[in-house]
Image (cartoon, rainbow, N blue to C red):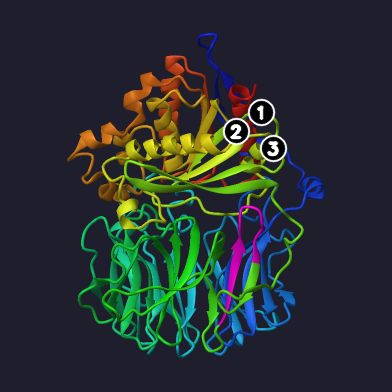
Amino acid sequence: MERLALQLLGGAMKTLIVAVILSSAALVTIDPGAAYARSRPVHQFLELAMAPNGAKLASVEGNSPLSGGYPVVRELVVRNTSTGRAVRVSLPCGHVRQCWPSALAWSPGGKRLAFALRRPGSHDRTIYTVAADGRHLHKILAFPGTVETLRFGPGGALAMLAVKGATKEVGATEPGAAQTGDLSGPTPEQRIAVYDHGTLHFVSPAGMWVYQYQWLPDGRGFIGTAAPGNGDDNWWIAKLYRFDRTSRAARVIFTPPDRRHQIADPVVSPDGKTVAFISGLMSDFISTGGDIWTVGTGGGVGRDITPKMKASALSLGFECDGQLRVLLLRGAAHQIVDLDPAQAVATPKLIWQGMETIYGPEGGAAAACPTALTATVRQSFTHAPEIAVGRIGHWHDLTHVNSTLSAPLQARNVTWTNDGYDIQGWLLLPQHMPSGKLPLITEVHGGPAAASVPRYVEPGTMRALLKRGYAVFLPNPRGSFGQGEIFASANVRDLGHGDLRDILAGIDQVEKIAPVDDQRLGIMGGSYGGFMTMWAVTQTNRFKAGVAAAGISDWTSYYGENGIDQWMIPYFGASVYDDPKVYERSSPIHFIKNVHTPVFAYVGADDIECPAPQTMEFWHALHDLGVPTSYAIYPGEGHGLRDPAHIADAKRRTLAWFARYLKN
């Protein structure tokens, strides 16, 4: 479609229905040069990799579009960790500069950096190496498919996760492949491959999708999480394997004890004897949280060494001395702790904590083992991301590219209790408070196994709401990370019910501490937050407007439409065919006649996590019932918008929707 198709549908006079099918060509009306001249973009750091000797730090980075989202132009930068001097690697991108580096990996001696390169729109990769000074770029492999997670082995061989003949990018959040033709053939497979002496060999068995892996210290094999069959769907039933490099055999060394335990982030101890990993109830491959488990690299009995921990482990990394470095979310704070993996029940030793968010590849930081030097990306609600280096807890900024930026807002940590749970969230207020009471937008995070944490509020919908005099509430109700596995699993077989009660109680608490107008409450969210928006307006009339992104209106039909139905079994306890009642109990469509709240909904046309028919079904019901509604479907988008023009369009529509129904 080459033009914007806007259809105003009939109905009662009180009903506004706008059905929008959008095309990229119709939406690209923004002049990036003119927009950038009016406002500074936020510089984002997407990947970090520290050289083994700590002398150099490589990063993938770029400016976000002013509408928000991932950088369209991405650069590979190598910095001296002592001086901060940066060298931008000259990439073979052509005049459009549209190629994206990823999967950074330093050679064992730190003399060369390997990375993968792709052009947006292509599912193929080319692997290059470059010298530590950013010069002498060398192409080593053109691969007809996707390549992820490059890792050098002890002898200098380069391992990777490769999908030959990929028809889509890796991950269920990426736009799905075209669902046409004979779809009953074999599914794609992501295998461990090793490039050595000019030849690429596949190591893991065919028919299996490997999600994460690490070399064994002797270089003879790998430890990884994997499952046979569909890679998008089967992460929730993955097991821990040992892969032999020579025989290509795969042997299970740990099976989760039940369906409520997913496994993620396996790391191997320096002596090669122990694997540590995170296990718990997780709703998404890219959103990790749980307890810390260990098992021998040869197999055996797995042990939860942090049982009943009132925190969620987010990332792990072994240190030189065999201690385990862990990034935790504990309530409102991120923490880095050390613990002894040999203990039956480990006692975490606090190294650092802060009301900010940090990012690093292993345990919250990229590390150079012999020097104890680490690097991380730090940010908060008001401070834009910067790379910091130093010993853990004694970092100093290596970059200052965002130093002149600040978000004009006040952030408050809010706590309350409900149904016996201690709950936490964040309240964001305009920096300069207007007189009178403020309308409040509650934004519910996705997941449900995730959390709202302090991330810089870049130019986008949230900042625009604050600028327009709204308050924004970011609750972490039951089912969220940050308070341990009991809390994270408290919404099992109860999706939408207890967590909505937690959110409403949180709004009550916000109204006690801030000048919020209870008659002007709005709700929004994406993914599970989109479901919660659709669900909330069927359960209460307290919200006067809602915006649902990639929501779920009917769990029964959703079970057969989505590409990741394995995640549902741990949360519902059974398939929809075995226990349909539990699915109906949490489906907004079964309570749709209760809705009086105007709702705008939008979704990506190629979303396989929360397919577009779920949004259309919800819109159709409100349309027939005479409730003000509109919806938009964005072409070429998966789970979450990426095209800057689409992001800008959704922002404009969201702001207009709330202005129509919440502003005096």
Task: Using a 10 Å C-alpha cutoff, classify the residue at mark 3 as few (fewer than 14 neighbours), some (14 to 19) or many (20 or more).
Answer: some
From the viewer's perspective, tell me whether residue 585 is left or right of residue 547. left
Secondary structure under tag 1 reads loop
Question: Is residue 384 located in the magenta-colored stretch of the structure?
Answer: yes
Residue drawn at point x = 53 percent, y = 41 percent = 473
- Seen from the viewer's position, the closer of residues 32 and 420 is 420
**Please, what is the three-letter code of the amino acid marked with disc 1?**
Gly
Badge 2: few (under 14), some or many (20 or more) residues near its Cα, within 10 Å?
some
Residue 233 shown left or right of residue 33 in the figure:
left
List the residue tagged with mark 3: 433
Q: Is residue 117 visible?
A: no
Q: Which residue is mark 2?
A: 515
Q: Could you tell which of marks 2 and 1 lies nearer the N-terminus?
A: 1
Q: Nearer the viewer, residue 404 or 89?
A: 404
Q: Which of 273 and 468 lies nearest the eye of the viewer?
A: 468
Question: CA gap, disc 2 to disc 1?
Answer: 7 Å
Residue 520 forms part of the magenta stretch: no
> Mark 2 near mark 3, Cβ–Cβ under 8 Å?
yes
Q: Judge whether 179 appears above or below 106 on screen.
A: above
- Disc 2 vs disc 1: Cβ atoms closer than 8 Å? yes
Looking at the rendering, which quadrant does residue 95 occupy? Answer: bottom right
Please state, as top left, top right, bottom left or bottom right, where the C terminus lies in the image. Answer: top right
Residue for point 60% across, 37% down? 471
Relative to 442, is 402 above or below? below
* Residue under the image location 66 percent in, 57 percent down: 383
Q: Mark yes or no: residue 619 visible.
A: yes
Q: Which mark is residue 653?
A: none
Q: Which of the 4 image quadrants contains residue 297? A: bottom left
Residue 331: % across, % down: 45, 56
Instruction: Read off the residue under disc 1.
Output: 436
Range shown magenta: 373-386
